[in-house]
Amino acid sequence: YKKHGVTEVVIVVGCHKAKIIRHVKKQHPDLHVTFLENPIYRKTNAIYGLWIARNAFPLNESVLFCHADVLFEEALIPHLLNKRGKNDTILAYKKGPTDEEAGKIILDNDERVTRLGKKISLREATGEYMQIAKFDPLFTRTMLDLLKTRIENEHQVNLYTIDLYNDVVRSKDVNAFGMEIGTLKITEVDTEADLRQAEKLFAHTNKNT
């Protein structure tokens, strides 16, 4: 992130928060990092992390967003930043085999995202959404408005972030586009088995992740 002009970072912490904070401060002392705590992370899903960070989102400039358990090649960042226009919303996705539980994405012929969700069938899906994106200001403002409704009014603290993004892309005037990652390496680490696979995948590219 630093190599591509990012100077402000916000991390929502919960499990092993002290280890994470200590590691980031030690490894990146020159980066301005704000840590926000989700005290009920055991009882909530990723959407509540967004709620915790709601006041940290810039409303007049684009923001890079990523789930913290996603490991990816550094080259993915400039691809997100330079795809289409500077202020477009871009969601990274991967074509190819996936599973029913994966968060999936549907694009139209103009690469515009029309639908997101885990319940999309494999037959319908364009690919798997990889949980890293660039949000333009309109997307962010719309997302935060819908997030307030989901949390304050409906108390839906256990939704996936992809459910909220699906609400956003279906809103009037909001455009989001997909970016297929091609041969770039990316993986999600949820289990020890995932970690072992990630170590093999990035065995020769550790300096570029």
Image (cartoon, rainbow, N blue to C red):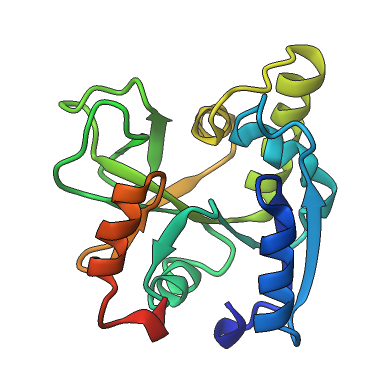
Residue at left offset 39%, top offset 66%: 72
Q: Quadrant of the N terminus?
A: bottom right
Residue 29 picture quarter: bottom right
At which x and y percent is residue 6? 65, 77
Q: Quadrant of the C terminus?
A: bottom left
Position of 171 with respect to 192 (left or right) is right
Q: Is residue 142 visible?
A: no
Residue furthest to the right: 55
Residue furthest to the top: 154
Residue at left offset 40%, top offset 72%: 79
When the figure is inspected, residue 163 is found, relative to residue 89, above or below; the finding is above
At which x and y percent is residue 194? 31, 51
Position of 143 with respect to 184 (left or right) is right
At which x and y percent is residue 98? 20, 39
Residue at left offset 19%, top offset 28%: 122
Position of 179 with respect to 31 (left or right) is left
Residue at left offset 43%, top offset 66%: 84
Position of 203 with respect to 45 (left or right) is left
When the figure is inspected, residue 86 is found, relative to residue 128, above or below; the finding is below
Number of marks: 0
At which x and y percent is residue 48? 70, 33
Q: Is residue 22 visible?
A: yes
Q: Nearer the viewer, residue 52 or 13?
A: 13
